[in-house]
Image (cartoon, rainbow, N blue to C red):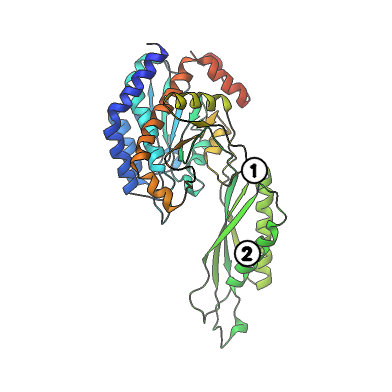
């Protein structure tokens, strides 16, 4: 079957699957689970792939809710990976629309499945947990999940259909301050105030912000600060999110943040434990893949905006994937252009009928882009040339 015929068939197949996909999206939306605890969503998605005939591996990269589903067509090749996210935000639920991301990836996989006997290639559906927690894709990369992958595709809901935007490198820095409790009125001199150390750290980081590059972001919260007003706090805990345009500068900022915590502890006479989480890398654009996505989105009637190269504030562990394989992280419109993730407005939009229609389109666009890559080795070659080379071209049909 020629590529045009394949594309027509996959669109029709996803339309036939729409009742099941709408049900799965709604079930994930109504059962929000935070990162590394997405047992319901992970099982729901993996089981759907298994029923369709995918070979499914669970507990990928040592993560209980991580999974990979693979299927090979009439001849194997380095797989096209389509990535699913399915974790929710604490206290907000699916206010980033990961129910849509997960179901779009599943829909692309299920839609392509009946056509694989017409395709020389391998398809991977990768379910990586905990994107909101500086997450699972980092472990997938470190464990070599994408080592021999041809390309990695995913899509994210937003207020516009867009080829991509700047994602900053990021990490979280957790600080636990240890002091000594005492009666705050009767014997304050015997206490060491861990909360004072924590507050001094915030004062230090607020001063630090004035001397960072414009692309850096630094913000934190106090998670523990004492148990009663008349007890000198013996323990305080804070977490800072640190971001920058690239990993090199991010690591420099982290060093300065750690110095603020150490100075704050010293000022109060306390001690501090500092835990730096794994780094989410900056997103490496691949314009060849992005353009292919954009053409397929336009063919389905979407107005497609170009990549926004203005530095924003968001980050994703898809950035780590983009450092090892040509990757895209475009957006699909589910609401008004003013829609902002991590808000109650986005939560409402992610459960709307409009968003579910967009999710079905997203599944189609991902599947159509995979067909382009399987049927045009020159396109894949161009994507790897832009990436920086390194692909074994003799393994591609």
In front here: 289 or 148?
289
Distance from disc 1 to disc 2, alpha carbons, whole Å, reads 23 Å
Q: Quadrant of the N terminus?
A: top left
Q: Label 2: few (<14), some or many (≥20) within 10 Å?
A: many
In this view, 213 is above or below 178 = above
Residue occupying image coordinates x 56% and y 24%: 288
Instruction: Where is residue 390? Give x, y as percent.
Output: 60, 23
In front here: 355 or 278?
355
154 relative position to 212: left or right: left
Q: Which residue is mark 1?
A: 245
Residue occupying image coordinates x 65% and y 58%: 258
Residue occupying image coordinates x 42% and y 42%: 335
In this view of the protein, can residue 80 be seen by the observer?
no
Earlier residue among tags 1 and 2:
2
In this view, 230 is above or below 40 = below
In front here: 105 or 60?
105
In this view, 174 is above or below 145 = below
Residue occupying the far bottom of the picture: 186
Residue occupying image coordinates x 30% and y 37%: 22
Q: Identify the element where label 2 is drawn.
A: helix
Q: Which residue is mark 2?
A: 202
Instruction: Where is residue 226? Give x, y as percent.
Output: 51, 73
């Amino acid at each position: 079957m020629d590529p045009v015929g394949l594309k027509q068939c996959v669109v029709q197949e996803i339309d036939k699957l729409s009742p099941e996909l709408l049900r799965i999206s709604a079930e994930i939306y109504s059962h929000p689970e935070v990162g590394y605890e997405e047992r319901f969503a992970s099982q729901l998605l993996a089981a759907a792939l298994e029923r369709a005939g995918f070979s499914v591996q669970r507990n990928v990269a040592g993560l209980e809710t991580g999974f990979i589903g693979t299927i090979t067509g009439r001849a194997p090749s380095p797989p096209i990976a389509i990535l699913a996210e399915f974790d929710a935000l604490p206290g907000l639920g699916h206010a980033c629309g990961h129910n849509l991301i997960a179901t779009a990836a599943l829909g692309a996989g299920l839609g392509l499945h009946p056509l694989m006997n017409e395709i020389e290639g391998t398809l991977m559906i990768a379910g990586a947990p905990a994107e909101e927690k500086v997450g699972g894709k980092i472990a997938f990369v470190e464990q070599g999940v994408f080592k021999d992958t041809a390309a990695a595709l995913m899509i994210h809901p937003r207020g516009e259909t867009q080829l991509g935007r700047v994602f900053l490198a990021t990490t979280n820095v957790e600080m636990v301050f240890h002091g000594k409790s005492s009666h705050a009125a009767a014997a304050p001199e015997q206490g060491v105030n861990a909360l004072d150390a924590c507050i001094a750290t915030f004062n230090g980081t607020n001063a630090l912000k004035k001397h960072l590059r414009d692309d850096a972001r630094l913000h934190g919260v106090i998670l523990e600060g004492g148990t009663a007003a008349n007890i000198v706090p013996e323990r305080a805990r804070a977490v800072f999110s640190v971001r920058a345009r690239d990993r090199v500068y991010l690591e420099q900022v982290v060093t300065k943040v750690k110095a603020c915590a150490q100075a704050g502890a010293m000022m109060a006479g306390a001690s501090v434990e500092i835990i730096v989480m794994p780094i989410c890398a900056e997103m490496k654009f691949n314009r060849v893949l992005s353009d292919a996505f954009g053409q397929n989105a336009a063919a389905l009637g979407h107005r497609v905006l170009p990549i926004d190269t203005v530095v924003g504030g968001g980050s994703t562990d898809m950035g780590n994937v983009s450092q090892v394989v040509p990757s895209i992280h475009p957006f699909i419109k589910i609401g008004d252009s003013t829609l902002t993730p991590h808000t109650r407005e986005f939560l409402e939009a992610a459960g709307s009928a409009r968003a579910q229609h967009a999710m079905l389109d997203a599944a189609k666009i991902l599947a159509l882009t995979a067909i382009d890559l399987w049927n045009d080795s020159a396109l894949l070659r161009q994507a790897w040339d832009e990436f920086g080379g390194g692909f074994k071209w003799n393994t591609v049909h």
